[in-house]
Each structure stands twice: as C-alpha cells, then as structure tokens.
C-alpha cells in the first residue's frame, strides 16, 4: 500500500486533536449544544453535530489545532493523563514545603498518595520549585487535595499563556479550590516541563 502523503497525515492529526479538544471543552457556553445531551453523549454524536459544535466553539474561541505543539500535547492527553500531569505539576510546586530532605518514610507516604510515576517525575524537576512559604505534612487527604487542585491551576495558567481559550479548557473548573497565591513564573515553567515529559503518555497505570 502506498504511504499516505505528509499533508494527509497532518490533516488526520489535526482532526484527531479537534475531537480531543471537543471532548474536554466546556460546552455549557455553547448555544449549539442541545440541552438533552449530557457530557457522556459527546462520544456518540453524529459527525454533523460534532462539526456543528466544534465550529460554534472555534468561531468564538479559535481553532486549537492552530496552536503550538506544546499546547497540542496537553489537549491530546486522555483524561487520566491530564490528571496525572496536574498531580505531577502540583507535586513539583509543593516539594520544598515537604522538607529539605525527604526521607524513606515520607517517600513511601507520598507514593501512596500520588503514585510512583508522578513522584519520580516531580523529583527530577525539583529545581523548578519555588521557595516554600511554609511547611506541609506529607501524609493525609488534605495534602492530596491541595497538590491536585494547585496542579490544575498550574496547567490552566500555562494553557492560557499558550493561547488556549477558556472554552477549550473544561478542566479549569477543577482549579476552583486551588491556592490564590501561586508564583506564576514558576507555575508556567513547571507546567511546560510536565507537558513535555514523555513518560506521562506511557500507559494508564498509576
């Protein structure tokens, strides 16, 4: 079989990205979204309705397929990969508050809370973490909630800087309980490193 032309591959990649963008968009602002459809209906939409919805959002919020590669990576993530990216970003940001030296007991506690892969990536990018304003306990649900919420804030800040309109950032509602005083420059650097990290795309295991 003849290999597809490069132009054809680009068209297919853009179409895949646009479907991914539609899957994570905030459709509550889209007048073309029929009220009888719930969020689970997105994967079962007829092509005509899918095109109509995308065109409606793209008209007001731009075409995400026209963004730079880093933003495309975030859009193209699955929900679980994007969640993992948020957790990893939050961990990197808050690592200094967990102590200058993280001992074996703390490592075990953090692994139990966040998983081995996010913690491993976070430790490799610890140099991007801002100076901590205070200390955090390395165990408990409160820490998990803070790290995850701030991770979503960090991804949202970075995505906005990349030019991704809010209507395409349906995950931004998860950032509502995040900190109000994040260091923006550190947050953007952290998100950029996390989104580019290839291991986030490998498998779905925690």
Image (tube, helix red, strand yellow):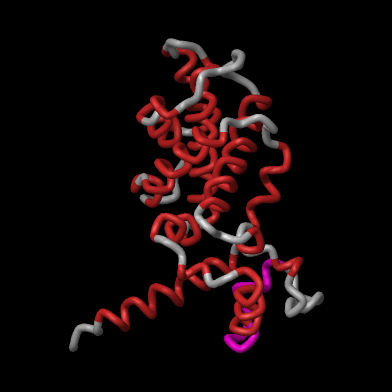
- The quadrant of the image that shows the N terminus is bottom left
Q: Which residue is at the far left?
A: 2
List x then y, in percent, for residue 115. Answer: 48, 33
Query: In front here: 97 or 107?
Result: 97
Q: Which residue is at the far right?
A: 35
Residue at image coords 58%, 45%: 157
Residue 59 magenta-drawn?
no
Residue at image coords 39%, 25%: 127
The prevailing secondary structure element of the residues shown in magenta is helix
Residue at image coords 66%, 79%: 56
Query: In front here: 112 or 95?
Result: 95
Count of numbered marks: 0
Q: Indicate left or right for 186 with 39 as reference.
A: left
Residue 48 magenta-drawn?
yes
Up-down: is 50 above or below 88?
Answer: below
- Which quarter of the figure has residue 148? top right
Up-down: is 134 above or below 95?
Answer: above
Q: Indicate left or right for 203 with 46 as reference.
A: left
List x then y, in percent, for residue 30. Answer: 73, 72
List x then y, in percent, for residue 140. Answer: 64, 22
Residue at image coords 54%, 52%: 159
Up-down: is 89 above or below 106?
Answer: below
- Which quarter of the figure has residue 169? bottom right
List x then y, in percent, for residue 86. Answer: 54, 42
Query: In front here: 135 or 183?
Result: 183
User: What span is in magenta?
Assistant: 39-49
């Amino acid at each position: 079989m003849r290999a597809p032309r490069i132009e054809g591959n680009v068209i297919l990649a853009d179409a895949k990205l646009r479907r991914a963008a539609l899957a994570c968009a905030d459709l509550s602002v889209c007048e073309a979204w029929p009220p009888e459809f719930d969020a689970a209906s997105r994967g079962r939409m007829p092509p005509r309705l899918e095109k109509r919805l995308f065109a409606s959002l793209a008209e007001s919020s731009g075409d995400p397929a026209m963004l730079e590669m880093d933003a495309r990576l975030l859009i193209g993530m699955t929900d679980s990969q994007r969640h993992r990216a948020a957790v990893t970003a939050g961990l990197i940001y808050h690592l200094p508050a967990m102590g200058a030296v993280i001992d074996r007991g703390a490592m075990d506690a953090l692994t139990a809370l966040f998983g081995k892969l996010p913690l491993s990536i976070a430790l490799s990018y610890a140099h991007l973490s801002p100076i901590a304003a205070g200390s955090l306990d390395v165990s408990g649900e409160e820490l998990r909630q803070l790290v995850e919420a701030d991770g979503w804030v960090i991804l949202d800040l970075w995505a906005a800087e990349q030019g991704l309109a809010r209507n395409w950032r349906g995950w931004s509602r998860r950032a509502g309980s995040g900190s109000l005083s994040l260091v923006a420059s550190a947050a953007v650097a952290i998100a950029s490193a996390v989104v580019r990290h290839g291991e986030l795309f490998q498998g779905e295991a925690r």
